[in-house]
C-alpha cells in the first residue's frame, strides 16, 4: 500500500500523548495519521493514577470523565521497606482509570473526529526529505509534513534514529523492570499507597470496574538474583515490607500472570531527533513514584496542538515551531524530571528511605512542596 496523500501530522504511537495529540490536531482541522503497533483495547504496564491537572483536558478531547464514576484519589500513604509509614493529603489529587479503558475511549474519539488511525501497524523507518517525512510501515508508506514520536519508553525507532541513550546501555541497577497486576482487595477508594522495598517501590490505587492497579518498579539486578522469576523475587524482596506481604497475601489477582516491561531507563533524552518531535516517555521518563507521567504526556500534546503551524506545508515555520516547543517543554517539565531523578536514586535504599520518611513526617508542608515540584497546574 502506498498512500500519495500528504498528512499534516503523522503520530507514531497511540498512547495518551499520541491519541490526545491526534484528537486535538484533528479538532483544528488538520489531516492526521496515527500508527499504533498494538490493537485496542490492550493493557499497559502503568500505575493508572492520573493527576487531576489533566481532567479538563481529557474532557476537552471528548471523553466524559464525569459520567464514568471514577475513583478520586485524595490521600497518599508511603511506607519504608521496614513498614514505617507516612500519610499525607494531596492538594491536587488524582483519579484512577485503566489504560485498557481510557486508551480505547480516546481511540474511538480519534476515529470519530477524522484521524486516520492504523492499529497493528509497526513503523519500520522514518526519514526526513526536503520538507516532509516519509514513513515506512508494514501497512504501507505515508507522507507527512510533521512527525511526532509518542511511542513510549522504548522502540526500535530509537535504534534507527541512533538516539544517544541507546548507545549507552548499562547493566545492573541502571536498568529497571516494571510489573503490573489488576487486583481485587479491601483498600480505601481514595488512597494511593507507595510501598518501598529494596531497590524498588510499589504503588496501589483504585481504578474503574471496581479493580485496583498494583504496579511496581525494581532493578533488573533484583530479578536476576532470583533466577528471573517474578514470584520468587516478590516473596524474597517485596514481602519484607509487611504492607506488601499483606496485600499480595489477601488480594485476588485479575490477571493470569503479571504484565512486565524491561529496560526502563531514566536518563535525559533529546527532545527532537532529525526533526521528529518527541512527547511523553519518548521525550523523557519521569520516575513513576512521582505519579505524573501520563499527565506530562497529555500536557505535551496540549502544548504541541497550540503551537502547531496554521500551514503545515510552510517549511519556514518549522524552526520556530521546534524552538517554541523546546522552550515550553523545558519550562513545564525540566524541573519535574530533575526532581524525579533525584528521588528515584534516594528511594529503594532501606535506611535512606526510612530516614527520608522520618524527616518528612513532622513537616507535611515540605512533602506538599516536593509533590508540587513534580506536578503542574490544571490545563
Image (cartoon, grey):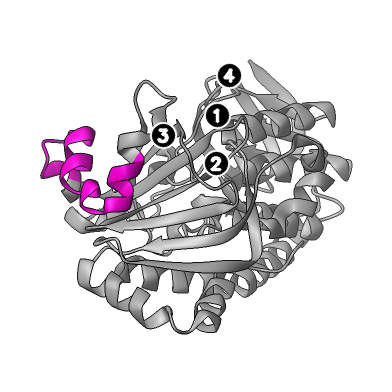
Query: The residue tagged with tag 1: helix, strand or loop?
Result: strand
Q: CA distance from mark 1 to mark 4?
A: 8 Å
Above or below, comparing residue 139 to residue 51 in the picture: above
Looking at the image, residue 315 sits to the left or right of residue 30; the answer is left
Q: Nearer the viewer, residue 199 or 68?
A: 68
* Badge 3 vs badge 1, beta-carbon distance below 8 Å: no
Residue 48 colored in magenta in the image? no
Residue wearing tag 1: 136
Which circle, 3 or 1, is nearer the viewer?
3
Which residue is label 3 attached to?
Answer: 181
Question: Pointer 2: what residue?
Answer: 127
What is the spatial separation of the Cα atoms under label 2 and label 4, in whole angstroms? 17 Å
Q: Residues within 10 Å of mark 2 (few under 14, many from 20)?
A: some
The mark nearer the N terminus, 3 or 1, is 1
Q: In this rendering, does residue 296 appear at all?
A: yes
Tags 2 and 3 touching, CB below 8 Å: no
**Marking on residue 237:** none
Say if residue 270 shows up in the picture: no
> Is 234 inside the magenta-drawn segment?
yes
Q: Position of residue 143 (x, y in %)?
A: 68, 34
Question: Could you tell me residue 362's position as x and y percent?
Answer: 44, 83
Classify residue 168 as left or right of residue 136. left
Q: Is residue 350 above or below residue 111?
A: below
Q: Earlier in the sequence, mark 2 or mark 3?
A: 2
Q: Give the class, few, some or many, for how many residues have Cα within 10 Å of label 1's Cα (few <14, many ≥20).
A: some
Q: Are marks 2 and 1 in contact (CB under 8 Å)?
A: yes
Tell me where residue 111 appears, x and y as whole percent. 78, 26
Real-space CA distance between mark 2 and mark 3, rounded to the nearest whole angstrom: 38 Å
**Circle 4 residue:** 139
Amino acid at each position: 500500500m502506498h498512500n500519495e496523500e500528504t498528512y499534516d501530522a503523522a503520530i507514531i504511537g497511540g498512547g495518551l500523548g499520541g491519541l490526545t495529540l491526534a484528537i486535538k490536531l484533528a479538532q483544528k482541522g488538520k489531516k492526521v495519521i496515527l500508527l499504533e503497533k498494538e490493537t485496542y483495547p490492550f493493557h499497559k504496564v502503568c500505575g493508572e493514577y492520573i493527576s487531576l491537572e489533566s481532567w479538563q483536558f481529557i474532557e476537552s478531547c471528548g471523553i466524559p470523565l464525569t459520567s464514568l464514576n471514577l475513583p478520586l484519589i485524595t490521600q497518599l500513604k508511603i511506607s519504608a521497606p521496614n513498614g514505617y509509614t507516612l500519610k499525607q493529603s494531596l492538594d491536587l489529587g488524582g483519579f484512577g482509570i485503566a489504560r485498557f479503558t481510557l486508551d480505547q475511549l480516546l481511540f474511538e474519539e480519534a476515529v470519530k473526529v477524522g484521524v486516520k488511525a492504523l492499529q497493528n501497524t509497526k513503523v519500520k523507518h522514518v526519514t526526513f526529505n526536503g520538507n516532509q517525512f516519509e514513513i515506512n510501515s508494514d501497512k504501507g508508506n505515508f507522507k507527512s509534513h510533521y512527525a511526532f514520536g509518542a511511542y513510549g519508553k522504548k522502540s526500535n525507532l530509537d535504534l534507527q534514529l541512533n538516539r544517544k541513550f541507546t548507545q549507552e546501555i548499562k547493566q545492573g541497577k541502571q536498568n529497571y523492570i516494571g510489573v503490573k497486576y489488576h487486583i481485587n482487595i479491601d483498600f480505601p477508594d481514595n488512597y494511593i499507597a507507595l510501598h518501598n522495598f529494596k531497590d524498588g517501590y510499589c504503588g496501589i490505587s483504585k481504578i474503574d470496574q471496581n479493580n485496583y492497579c498494583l504496579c511496581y518498579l525494581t532493578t533488573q539486578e533484583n530479578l536476576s538474583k532470583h533466577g528471573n522469576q517474578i514470584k520468587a523475587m516478590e516473596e524474597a524482596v517485596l514481602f519484607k515490607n509487611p504492607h506488601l506481604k499483606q496485600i499480595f497475601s489477601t488480594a485476588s489477582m485479575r490477571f493470569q500472570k503479571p504484565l512486565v516491561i524491561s529496560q526502563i531507563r531514566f536518563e535525559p533524552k533529546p527532545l527532537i531527533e532529525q526533526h521528529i518531535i518527541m512527547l511523553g516517555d519518548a521525550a523523557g521518563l519521569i520516575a513513576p513514584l512521582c505519579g505524573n507521567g501520563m499527565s506530562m504526556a497529555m500536557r505535551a500534546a496540549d502544548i504541541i496542538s497550540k503551537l502547531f503551524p496554521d500551514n503545515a506545508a510552510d517549511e519556514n515555520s518549522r524552526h520556530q515551531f521546534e524552538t517554541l516547543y523546546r522552550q515550553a517543554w523545558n519550562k513545564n517539565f525540566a524541573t519535574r524530571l530533575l526532581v524525579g531523578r533525584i528521588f528515584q536514586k534516594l528511594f529503594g535504599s532501606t535506611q535512606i528511605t526510612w530516614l527520608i520518611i522520618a524527616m518528612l513526617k513532622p513537616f507535611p508542608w515540605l512533602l506538599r512542596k516536593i509533590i508540587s515540584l513534580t506536578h503542574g497546574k490544571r490545563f
